[in-house]
Image (spheres, rainbow, N blue to C red):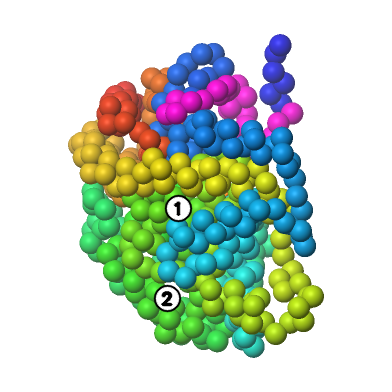
Amino acid sequence: MELDLQSYWMPFTANRYFKRHPQLLESAAGMYYTTRDGQRILDGIAGLWCVNAGHCHPRIVAAVREQVGKLDYATAFNLGHAGAFELASELKKLAPGNLGHAFFVNSGSEAVDTALKIALAYHRVRGEGQRFRFIGRERGYHGVGFGGISVGGMVANRKAFASAMLPGVDHLPHTHDLARNAFSRGQPTHGAELADALERLIALHDPSTIAGVIIEPVSGSAGVLLPPKGYLERIRAICDKHGLLLIFDEVITGFGRTGSAFASHTFNVQPDLMTVAKGITSGVVPMGAVLVDRRIYAACVSESGFQEQAVEFFHGYTYSGHPLACAAGLAALSVYREEGLFERAASLAPAFADALHSLRGAPHVIDIRNIGLMGAVELEPRKDQPTLRALDVFQHCFASGVLVRTTGDIIALTPPLIIEPAQIAQIIDALGKALKAVA
Ligand code: PLP
């Protein structure tokens, strides 16, 4: 039967182009998709930076199947089910420092908006309700809620909604500096001083008006922009000096992507709040969470002084801690642990870096960068046609059976952590050929 392609308004998609050139996925296993017309596609981007354990992992699939026949749904408001408590407890073991509490949501966007609300609630309950501002960063991506686009720094995601932004938000400069840092492996050398812009914003607004700072330790959607050496440490120190909460958005970097459980471990910098999603269930069921420092939970809940029967935090979703998501999350965490996937990401990282950097000198390439199993190849944009060269590269790769991701004129690679060295070579080979083929 012919598919009706018109009824579905696709997200973040050139709908008209897609519907003239549809590419439909039908099934998946391990490192591969199979398209509707039977083509096998090697997944170089873990779905959308999320399928860290590989597609249709049998243990995660089995856990979800078992759960759906046992308890399909349970409200999280004044009732519960064991899975949510178990998953929160597992996350506490995995999380850095004192991030001992998890607030469950259904996506990265919801995690971000929830983290902003928790920051406001924390200051308010401590009698500092005048702290209402947030500082984000240029080129940051924090999802598509009104909070997330306000603190985010992706112009295309903001301009149409400029009238509806959160009040009082300001932005740090981004750290991408091709003049000084092109072709860096791991953290670039130059740019720690860009953190000092935070001092200037604090001086401008006064610390007493600022609730917190939200940044991705590695900007993902903007094209894998790594923090310069010393940068995150300085941001942390400035937040401490002025009583600002530091929120790390680890929706992409969480669950092994940088070679440790979280980028916070990789860079050894501790946030007060952390947003996660994607890899929390290896992409199998939508889920996100805010991981919260013990002292914030204590201030908002256990030592809040509210009457015991009172709701402490007026926030939550119908599907917070959904049983299927919790089953998928528990299974994913156990797969990560038992298959040693975070360690695998760390041990494959040098070979991944070598393969990626072998493209230096290929046509159009102006930068290559990497950390863990996360990398990007930046292309010189075509004159007056930004993004189109990268889109052509995407099409060439897809035609040769490899899925990459483009953002602007940047090609991002973030494979599942189960990738084999030969598959890394296949991705780089396809990319190299595509770079030679495109104008
Ligand atoms: N935060 C970051 C850092 C992300 O990369 C994303 C999505 O890519 C989000 C938030 C939003 O997540 P979601 O698309 O699940 O709402």
Tag of residue 30: none
Q: Quadrant of residue 69?
A: top right
Locate residue 47, reporting x and y percent.
49, 36
Q: Is residue 125 above or below residue 88?
A: below
Image check: 119 left or right of 221? right
* Label 2: element kind: helix
Query: How many numbered marks are there?
Result: 2
Locate residue 179, reporting x and y percent.
25, 56
Q: Quadrant of the C terminus?
A: top left
Image check: 268 left or right of 336? left
Tag of residue 198: 2
Image check: 298 left or right of 213? right
Residue plotted at (45% across, 58% down): 94
| Camera-nearest residue between 212 and 52 | 52
Which residues are drawn in magenta? 7-32
Q: Is residue 352 magenta?
A: no
Q: Quadrant of the N terminus?
A: top right
Tag of residue 254: 1
Q: CA distance from mark 1 to mark 2?
A: 25 Å
Residue plotted at (54% across, 13% down): 37
